[in-house]
Amino acid sequence: LLSYPYYGEHQGGIATPPQNHLVFTSFDVRATSAVELQLVLAKWSAAMAEMTAGRPVGKVEPTREHGIPVDTGEVFDTGPQGLTLTLGFGPSLFDGRFGLEKFKPLNFDDLPAMAGESLNPAYTGGDLCIQACANDPQVAYHAVRNLARMARTQVSTKWTVLGFGRASAGPAQKTPRNLLGFKDGTRNVSTPDDFAQHVWTGKEAGQPWMEGGTYLVARKIHMLIETWDEDTIGDQQSIFGRTKQEGAPLSGKLEHDVPNFHATEGNDPLIPADAHMSLVAHENNGGTKVLRRSYNFTDGLDSVGRLDAGLMFLCFQKDPEQFVKLQRKLGLSDRLNEYIRHVGSAVFAVPAGLPEAGNYYGKEFF
Ligand code: HEM
């Protein structure tokens, strides 16, 4: 019955260890007045506190026979299950509809178009997002369902991804595997120093509400699973620069051996220069790092019966430019591109945590 504190310096679901399940949902605000938006943010913030603690958002059984249940009830007796709810604001929220232009963080816009993406507008953008993570999928789903329900006339759901297994490791967690069969999250941001340097936003956003916040980049990445499954092990390993079973860098033996990008066999580098890992490693990018917190997803089968599945890539960074810098390199040269398609994309400014009850996300805007 694990639970994480809701109030604190940072929102949950970022530095907290990745739970097993994800429901990520992006929303459009249909309301046209700032007051309506304010009401949604205040209601959501309070409801998020209740659900994080494992409590319903209101009565499951109203006292009056004719009453409609406030909480939908499907997790009434599950406990919190390590639920974290992370709220983000999309760039479009600051476009002028609500008079919030002056609260827009510096350098915060939709991500630029990048090589190799085939984005579907149905999985792109959003004014608000909720990342719900929990160890019971029904608890994560209930949270998004109830938030959507209580704001139904002001906010509409835009796109959603159900992640069925974590594909990233936090500190002290065993590294899980993505659907290509490789360990994912071996070298991830983990120390407090790394978080301070690469993840938590400070004064550079030009907005006090972002100090202690971060930016979330969400990429829905489809995998061409049938094609991948016909590839040889040698090719698969050189695509990532790591072995499949152990997850060791091709220059070493064990998963956590530090990769040596200069090690050679004859004239060839042991880790190919165009391996996924080589392209994005901090050693080869002037120290740039992002916190990855991704999930495996499936949407069942596509229209011709192929497995429709992939990676809901989620990463956190103090400036969206960190992601853009890495993805620009991947988009041009990653040998993995033959087996994946970026079909969805969004970026959100994730405000700092709420200090205590009585506050709500976006309070500074109104
Ligand atoms: C490392 C898989 C997309 C950034 C890795 C590793 C795997 C992997 C297996 C090696 C183990 C590890 O250190 O975690 C994938 C798959 C992807 C994908 C299957 C798409 C379906 C991306 C994207 C980015 C990214 C879009 C960011 C732009 C990184 C970084 C590392 C990494 C920064 C660590 C490199 C290092 O420091 O050694 N990825 N990845 N990945 N990936 Fe990805």
Image (tube, grey):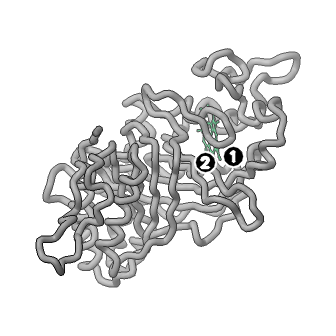
Badge 2 element: helix
The residue pinned by badge 1 equals: 329
Instruction: Please state, as top left, top right, bottom left or bottom right, where the N terminus lies in the image.
Output: top left
Q: Is residue 15 above or below residue 35?
A: above
Query: 10 Å neighbourhood of mark 2: few (<14), some, or many (≥20)?
Result: few
- Residue, x 29% and y 66% (percent of image)? 72
Badge 1 element: helix
- Residue, x 44% and y 72% (percent of image)? 157
The residue pinned by badge 2 equals: 325
- Residue, x 16% and y 51% (percent of image)? 356
- Residue occupying the far bottom of the picture: 32
The one nearer the camera, 358 or 199, is 358
Query: What type is the residue that disc 2 sits on?
Result: Lys
The reply to whether callout 1 and callout 2 are in contact (CB within 8 Å) is yes
Q: Position of residue 286 (x, y in %)?
A: 59, 35
Q: Position of residue 58 (x, y in %)?
A: 19, 64
- With 163 as the anchor, is 106 left or right in this view? left
